[in-house]
Amino acid sequence: MNNTIDLCGLFRQKQSLEDQMLARNLYAKTAMTGYSFASKHDSEYLALMGETSRQMDELLIKIMDEQDRMKTTGPEHFMREDVFVWGGPTPLWGGSMAPDTSIRGMEYFGAENAVYVYGPLDDDALELHKCCKRLICQVTRTARSGGQQESDVQCAERLSLLSLKYTNIIGGIADDLVSYLGKNYSVRDIQEVHTAIKKHNQALDLYGVVYARELDNSNIPRVADCIDAVNLWIDRKSELAEFDMIIEKCRVRFPGKKIMLGLFMQDIGLSDLEYGGELMLRCLDRAERAYRNGKIQSLVILGDREIAKYPSLAQVIKQYFAQRFV
């Protein structure tokens, strides 16, 4: 994880040098009589820009070296250990208030990991989820069923402490992180949540939900410093044509961060209708290719409420994983 923080730091340095170079270039254009665009520059211009340009060269080499060092490849096919099922008790979106909804979805798809959201974060819930090999739990109040009495920071710190007892917990997640930035919380709030989740267990990761359409948000570089992993969702069906480009863009906007790709079963951003089976298979194939090439590290799909709404499509996904979880 230190490597990802270092890479984000290098990108911050790059932005600072870029700003300096733009300012120096603007000064040259407006105040230096001998300046001529795209010409061989004189000693006055070299004195103004040369050292900053040299620093940028050195920094770019460092960034490229780090990017090359971090390049990895993944398994040929999705491994059970890297597939999660999202779920939890909620009356929204056709859901159920049953406490074991995430587990039912996980078992249906033959998975062994869950992203547990919406429900309470307490011993009862975590005892119920001890059957999960790897577990990520919600630590922010967004869409929490019945509300959340404690602050997000207190919730994250409690998860950190509980993870010492429930060792299948690998992290916490902030749902709709960018969507609610400036509404439910600030960048500083998320940084405090990040600090709190590691208070008792430094190994825990903070995941943040980001939608593909939000990758151009101007706050992304600051958000990237506050999380360990991105949970990236493509919520508009039309964006699937740019699937590979979106993955690459996410990797650029969140340099060095792990990516958990989320796949919807319905086009919630446009038509709100379910995907066709063939389109779902194409999405899974592209996701698996990104996984194989080391561009995403895990996958999460929605669980029991979608199984109930779209049983035929859920069966397509179940069969897809059955061919891989051997």
Image (cartoon, rainbow, N blue to C red):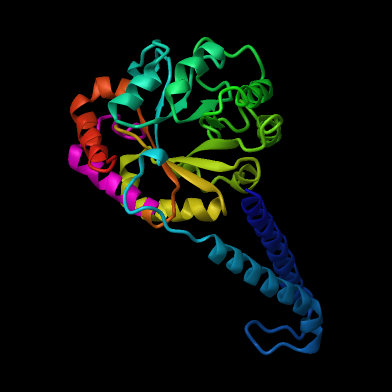
- x, y percent for residue 192: 71, 32
The residue lying at 59 percent from left, 42 percent from top is: 228
- Work out which quarter of the rendered image holds the C terminus and state it: top left
Please say whether residue 275 is one of the residues in the magenta stretch: yes
Picture quarter containing residue 237? top left
Please say whether residue 208 is one of the residues in the magenta stretch: no
Q: Is residue 207 positioned above or below 114 on the image? A: below
Q: Is residue 29 visible?
A: no
Picture quarter containing residue 156? top right
Q: Is residue 97 left or right of residue 164?
A: left
The residue lying at 53 percent from left, 14 percent from top is: 120
The residue lying at 75 percent from left, 73 percent from top is: 52
Q: Is residue 124 positioned above or below 82 on the image? A: above
- x, y percent for residue 259: 48, 46
Query: What is the span of residues highlighted in magenta in the rendered image?
Result: 266-291
Picture quarter containing residue 64? bottom right
- x, y percent for residue 43: 80, 88
> Of 319 and 10, which appears nearest the observer?
319
Q: Is residue 146 positioned above or below 175 on the image? A: above
Q: Is residue 209 visible?
A: yes
